Amino acid sequence: MRKIRLWAVATCSALAVMASSAAQAETLADALISAYRNNNLLEQNRALLRATDEDVAVAVAALRPVVQFVAQSTYSFQRVHADATLLTPAGRTNVENLNSSVGLTASMTLYDFGRNALAVEAAKETVLATREALVQVEQNVLLDAVNAYVQVQLAQSIVNLRRNNLGLIDQELQAAQDRFDVGEVTRTDVSQAQAALAASRSDLTSAEGDLKVAREAYKAAVGHYPVDLAPRPAAPRTAATMEAARQVALRAHPQVRQAQRQVAAADLNVARAKAAMRPSISAEANVGLDDEGQESASVGLSLRHTLYAGGELSALYRQTLANRDAQKANLLQTGVNVAQNVGVAWSTVEVASAAIAAGDEEVRAARTAFEGVREEATLGARTTLDVLNAEQDLLNSQADRLTAEAQRYVGIYQVLASMGLLTVEHLNLGIPTYDPAAYYNAVKHAPATSSQGKRLDRVLKSIGRN
């Protein structure tokens, strides 16, 4: 009973240690969250999106009146003759005047065939296109984090294999030395084991270097060095077939949606260029006060129509047509590229899956061969070199199996990214995400001061950019 109690206490202690270690281990979800929160590229593109949001405010401002305060002062000098018949300097008089005035002027475009309104709509489409570009950046950031997580684990596994290999070869060297001492083998067998041991040490150093490189890549992608990475969770679901994945990608991929918005903006710019060839009607109002206390006021309407501008307006119109054609071609090519990326990512997963299945058979066969060769060597039927070669074959098969498994795991996330679904929201990471509409809603009506300006201040503070 005492032994049973001691065993139970030891087991509970071990489980507690394991639970504590698991609780402290960094999971893949933790790494993705850290990457999303700390990535500078995401911050850069969020700021670029906010700058694009302001283009809507600028376009909206063109629909409103412009009020200006004007203060001006004019000094004039004139030399006149007191007597026109006198041409001597003494007959000349200098007249100096200093006139000052202050006033307000207001002007507003009343009708321009929709040119300014089209500019607002084009700016809105550009904002939506930039939002899709931000989603693509998010996908790239998360995919880099997944790859970095997997590569660190793979590099660590390879290091462990190399260390085990070094231990086995060291044992083989000792065994060869023992057999040499009793005359069972020659010095050649010992030298072969010594050479294999040196090569194994070199391979271990190289593997440790690869691990350091992987750790640096992890820090760049996630924001900190890996300490204790938890085992990889089950890979997310993607699609039942490659064709189904392609259909989702052509509908949902941010690059496709961005290209669609760019085509819509190009269409609006064509209409704007056509409207620029037509006249515009504007209203103007002025009130003023001069230095003699005289007040003035005026209102008026003006119609402006460019009759000749050296061909500039026609050139701008043709330019918008060419840009629209370019955006339409870009949309078609984007669809081709997205479909291709789905196929490539899907094939990567299939190839890696086949490699895993073959790797399992290879590892089992290589292990059986190694154990058999080593047993035969103890009986004198095999040489030390045979044992070393068999052990190397086993090591290579294990490393290939681990690499294929890592490629398949990352490949599944690549499929998800190629479908346009590798986002924090789709992965259900359970954290607050950046709201691209918050800043836009605060500036879309072009606020200047007052309560709207205060609301904008709150938005800037909430995203940490005040």
Image (spheres, rainbow, N blue to C red):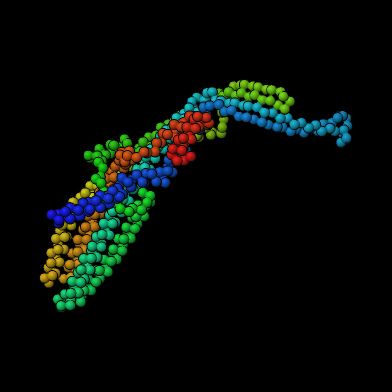
- Give the residue at x 25% y 46%: 233
- Give the residue at x 70% y 26%: 290
**Residue 138 as seen in the image, left or right of residue 154:** right
Q: Is residue 378 above or below residue 183?
A: above
Q: Is residue 67 above or below residue 48?
A: above
Rendered location of residue 240, percent (x, y): 22, 39
Q: Is residue 65 above or below residue 226?
A: above
- Give the residue at x 49% y 32%: 454
The image quadrant that residue 400 belongs to is bottom left
- Give the residue at x 52% y 25%: 112
Rendered location of residue 202, percent (x, y): 29, 66
Furthest-front residue in this view: 2
Tell me the quadrant of the picture where the N terminus can be found: bottom left
Q: Nearer the viewer, residue 351 or 370?
A: 370
**Residue 17 as seen in the image, left or right of residue 378:** right
How many marks the image carries: the answer is 0
Rendered location of residue 318, percent (x, y): 47, 34
Q: Nearer the viewer, residue 94 or 447?
A: 447
Quick check: can you spot residue 265? no
Q: Is residue 423 above or below residue 284?
A: below
Quick check: can you spot residue 296? yes
Rendered location of residue 420, percent (x, y): 32, 39
**Residue 100 as seen in the image, left or right of residue 167:** right
